[in-house]
Image (tube, helix red, strand yellow):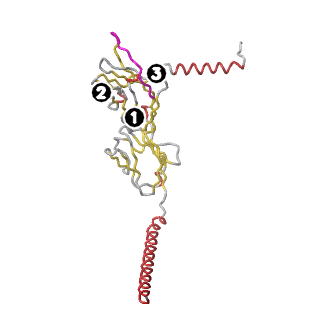
Amino acid sequence: MKTEPVHIRPFIYLQCFLLARLIESSSLGSASPLLISSTVGNQAVLPCSWRKRLESMTSTCYVQWARVTGTVFERRGSDKWEADAFENRLEVPEETLRSGNCSLIIKDVQIGDTGTYESFMVVKLTDQQTKVFIQGIKLLVFDHKSRQTLAPGEDLLLELHTSHSLAVSFQHRDKSESSDLWVKGQQNNSPRLVYDPLKNQLTLKNLSYSDEGTYKVLDKQGLAISTMKLTIEERTKALKVQQPVEKDAASDAADRSSRSALLSASLLLVSFRFSHLFW
């Protein structure tokens, strides 16, 4: 079997790497996509301006936004279409599109929205329509992460962040497995749980040491919208008692200072009057 000399192998690896990079960037948008990041539940704007590629539009503005899986949004004049996965969450305003701004607005972004997006303007050349690449955007969506320390008997407030929140799982600090603490729409949730649909919040009342652990808000795909680690600690009574004591001590010091200043002023006034008697 014929083998390559050892000193040639690094060049072969380099050629394979460059070929892979070439294939990866061989789409119409050969330039590196712009990076945009957001957190679940917020609004993301993928910037786009068709005037960078086209001087003017002789017909009705027609924009398309696509991912690897296919087209996710189209607008042609007042008509628009969006993929089912983004229902009522995508928009390119008609008035801004006419002025050259084809930016895609994604409302209530989800973890599943992460990926690369490409925008195209569909223009008519002679008797055919042609797609002109405008902009490539790579969107990164992150979950919320936090820590809380509460005392036994207090309440835990969990922000659900988005209307797409489906469940909350709980993993005790001493266990490796998690279980569903709350599922939207189910009637057998714990009576200690209070769900506020208007504020999109969940409250776990009357905490105990057994509630210490990790809480995750999950979407329909089971992806984490937020992760919160809860620690339960007894509040020290010394701190609560010490605060008013310090306040009283400070008040006494202020009173003593005030009385001392008043006494000094009185002595000064008396000495001034005596000096006038002798002069």
Q: CA distance from mark 1 to mark 2?
A: 18 Å
Provide the residue span drawn in magenta: 125-137
Q: Which residue is mark 3?
A: 29
Q: Which quarter of the image is occupied by the C terminus? A: bottom left
Which structural element holds mark 3? loop
Disc assigned to residue 44: 1
Looking at the image, tell me whether mark 1 or mark 3 is earlier in sequence order.
Answer: 3
Where is 132 relative to 180, above or below? above
Q: Give, as a three-letter code, the residue at label 2.
A: Glu
Mark 2 — residue? 94
The residues bearing labels 2 and 3 have C-alpha atoms spaced at a distance of 24 Å
Query: Which label's residue is closer to the chain start, 2 or 3?
Result: 3
Residue at 36% across, 30% down = 86
- In the image, taking residue 6 as reference, residue 25 lies left or right, namely left
Residue 41: give x, y in percent of width and height: 39, 39
- In depth, the one of 168 and 150 nearer the eye is 150
